[in-house]
Amino acid sequence: MDRAAIVHENFRRRVAARDFPAGAPPAGPLEAVQAVAIYRAACLSRALDRQSRAMQKAGQGFYTIGSSGHEGMAAVAAALRPTDMAFLHYRDAAFQIARADQVPGQSVAWDMLLSFAASSEDPISGGRHKVLGSKALNIPPQTSTIASHLPKAVGAAYAIGAARRRPPEHRILPDDAIIVASFGDASANHSTAQGAFNTAGWTSYQAIPLPLLFVCEDNGIGISTKTPRGWIAAGFSARPGLRYFAADGLDIYQSFAVAAEAAHYVRHHRAPVFLHLGLIRLYGHAGADVPTTYLSREEVEADEANDPLLHMVRQLDQAGALAPADALAIYHDSAARVTRIAAEAVTRPRLKTATDVVASLIPPARPCAATNGPTPEARAAAFGADLKLINEPQPMSRLLNWALTDLMLAHPEIVMMGEDVGRKGGVYGVTQKLQARFGPDRMIDTLLDEQSILGLAIGMAQNGFIPLPEIQFLAYLHNAEDQIRGEAATLPFFSQGQYTNPMVLRIAGLGYQKGFGGHFHNDNSVAVLRDIPGLILACPSNGADAARMLRTCVRLAREEQRLVVFLEPIALYPMRDLHAEKDGAWMCRYPAPTETIALGEVGVSGTGTDLAIVTFANGNYLSHQALPRLTAAGIATRIIDLRWLSPLPEAGLLAAVQGCQHILIVDETRRSGGVAEALMALFAEQTAVPAARLTATDSFIATGPAYGATMPSADSIFQAALALIGGKA
Ligand SMILES: Cc1ncc(C[n+]2csc(CCOP(=O)(O)OP(=O)(O)O)c2C)c(N)n1
Ligand SMILES: [Mg+2]
C-alpha cells in the first residue's frame, strides 16, 4: 500500500474509534463555524491530493506535488483578507480553498481539477501548469523555483505603501492590504530567500512601510534533507526589522490565533513578520518519492500518526463544534465530490498545438489614460538650467537623462530603482538630478542586491507601477537573472495574461571602455537575454536613437504590458567624436518628446549596394569609423543598425539589405551564442546574398591595453569587408 492509502485508512479507522493524537485543546478566537469551514477546506485539499495521484496513475493528471500535512494553512487564510495578495508555497491548496470561502461565486475544486488535468479551461494557467493561483482570489501563480517569489513579495509589499502616497492608474492592492508569502523550511536557506528577508528587514529597519507576512511552513525536511532541529527559530527569532511569531500548524485554533495576531501586527505597523508554522509532510515529497528510502519507517509512521486532519477532528470535537461522526462524513463527502468533479474535468479540452501554448506569451494590451505630456512650465521646472542646452548636441548619457526626465514627467507611475541611481545619479551619471527632480520615492537607492532590485520592480509592476530598474553592469545581471528569466517573463504565460509585470530594465553593458574594468565591467554577451520568450531587448548606438527608443520601450511596458530590457552601451555614453578629436560627430540633438522609433524599425545609413554592414551599438560606431576607408576603396556601403536585438527585426532587416551584393555582420558579442549566429541564419534562410560575420572572440575581456583585442575594430571591419568582397577593392 502506498503512503497515501495508509494515511487514508488510518484516518477512517482512528476517527471511527475516536483514537486521536494528543495535543492542546482548542483555545483562542476561532469560532465554531470558521473552524468547521477550515476543516472542510482541509478535507477538500486532502481529497484533491489523493485524486491527483489517481489521475496520474490513469494518465489523466501530470503533477502530484501535494498539500497533505500542510492543511493548517487554511487557518492562515482564514486570518487574512482575500485582498491580501498571496504568493504561495506549492503546498498551499488548503489556503487557496479557504480563501475561496471568502469570495462569492468560486468553484475552487473544479478549477483545481482542471489544472490537475492540464485542461485549457484551467482558469489560472490555461493548462500550462498544475499550479495554485487565481485572479479572483489575489493569488498569482508561482514558479517551481523555490524562494524565487520572495523578492517580488517584498516588492509588492513596498508597492502598497508607494501606492498610498501616489496611486498609479492600474493599481490593484487597496491601502490596507498586506502581502503574504509562504515557503518551506528548506527553501528558507536559499540565497534568494535570505536576500528577501534581509531586504525586508533592511527596509523596515529604516521605518519604511513594508506590510509583509512571511510564512515558513516548517515540516522539518526538504525532499530528503532534514532541517536541523531548531534551525528556523534560531535563524529568525531575532532578525533585525523582522518580527517573529510561531505556532503549531497542526493546531488550527492556535494557528488562526497567531496568524491573526501576526496579520494584525503587519497591517497595523506596516512592518514585516516572520510567522513560523510547525507542520508535517505526508506521503513524501511528491508522487514518485518514497520517503522510506531515506527516513526510517518509525519516523514516517510518527508523522502519519500526527495527521493534522486527526488533530482537527479532535479539536472540533473538544470545542463542541463538530462530532467525529459528522467530521468523517464531511471527509467522505469531500472525496466523493472530488471524484465526481474529476471525472468531468478530465474530459475537458487540453492544449494541443504550439499555437495553443504560445497564446499567452505576450500579455494583453491594457487601456491607459491619455497623457498630453508635461506642460512647458513643468518641463521648465524639472529641466532647470538644462533647458538652455537642449538644442545643442550632447552625448548619449545626457540625452538619456533628458528622455528619462520627460518620461517621468509624463507618467507619474514610473519609478526607478537600483544601486546608486538616486543621490549619485548612477555610476555614469545617466540618472543625475532625477532624484532632485522627482524625489527619493521615485528614484529609489536600493541596497546592494540585484535579486532584490528586480524583485522590487516585479512587485511594484504587479501593483500598477511602471518600474525602470537598473542593473549597474551587465555582468551583475547574472546573479539575479532568474528574476527576469524565470519570474518576470513567465508570469503572463502561466496566468494567461491575468497577472503581468511590465517594466523597462535598464542595463549598462557591452565592452570597449578604454582600459577600464576588465570583463566584469565590459561583459559582451547577451545570449542570456536573447532566448527569453516574449522579452524585448533594445540596444541603441547613439543618443538620439536612445531617447526615441526608450520612449517606445516605456510605451510598450505601459500600454502593452511588455517586459523590456534596454541595454545601454557604456562606452558610447560619453562618446562625442567619430573620426577626429572635437569633430563632435557622435553627438546628437535631443529629439522632441513626441519622436519615437518603433519596435522592429532598424536604422539605415547610406544607400550603397556593394556592401551592407549589419551591426549594432559599438559595432555601429566602429563601422561608421571604417566608412571613409571603405568609400575610398570603392566599396559603396550602407550601414544598418539593428537597434532591437530580440526579437530580431527580421522584416526591417530584410528590407534594409535589399539590393546589396554582400552582407557583413559586425557583432561585438561573442562568436558562440552571439547575435551574429541568428543573423547568419536569417540571411542564409531568407536571401541569396553572400554573408560573412566579424564577431568577438570566444573570450572574456581583458583590462589594460588589450581591452579591445577580442572585439571588432574599425580596422578589422575594413579588412573583413575587403575579404568578403574579394577582388573588388
Ligand atoms: C531553486 C530550486 N532548487 C531546487 C529545487 C528542487 N526542489 C523542489 S522542492 C525542494 C525542497 C523544498 O523543501 P522545503 O522548502 O522544505 O519545502 P517542502 O517541500 O518541504 O514543503 C527542492 C530541492 C527547486 N524547485 N528550486
Ligand atoms: Mg520542508
Image (tube, grey):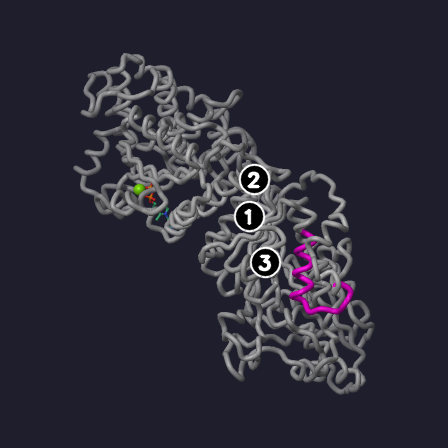
What amino acid is found at the position of numbered circle 3 in the picture? Answer: Arg
Amino acid identity at mark 1: Asp
The residue that disc 1 covers is: 441
> Residue beneath label 3, please?
506
Could you give the CA–CA distance between mark 2 and mark 1, rounded to whole angstroms? 9 Å
> Residue 634 vs residue 214: left or right?
right
Q: Residue at (72%, 63%) from the top-left corner? A: 545
| Most common SS among magenta residues | helix
Question: What stretch of residues is rendered in magenta?
Answer: 390-407
Q: Name the foreground residue: 293 vs 481.
A: 481
444 or 683: nearer the viewer? 444
In this rendering, the answer to whether 41 lies above or below 506 is above
Residue 297 magenta-drawn?
no
Q: Residue at x 21, y 29 (%)?
A: 305
Q: Is residue 509 above or below residue 726?
A: above
Within-10-Å neighbours for mark 1: few <14, some 14–19, many 20+ = some
Whether residue 628 appears in this view of the structure is: yes
Q: Nearer the viewer, mark 2 or mark 3?
A: 2
- The residue wearing badge 2 is 165
- Give the mark nearest the N terminus, 2 or 1: 2
**Badges 2 and 1: C-beta atoms under 8 Å apart?**
yes
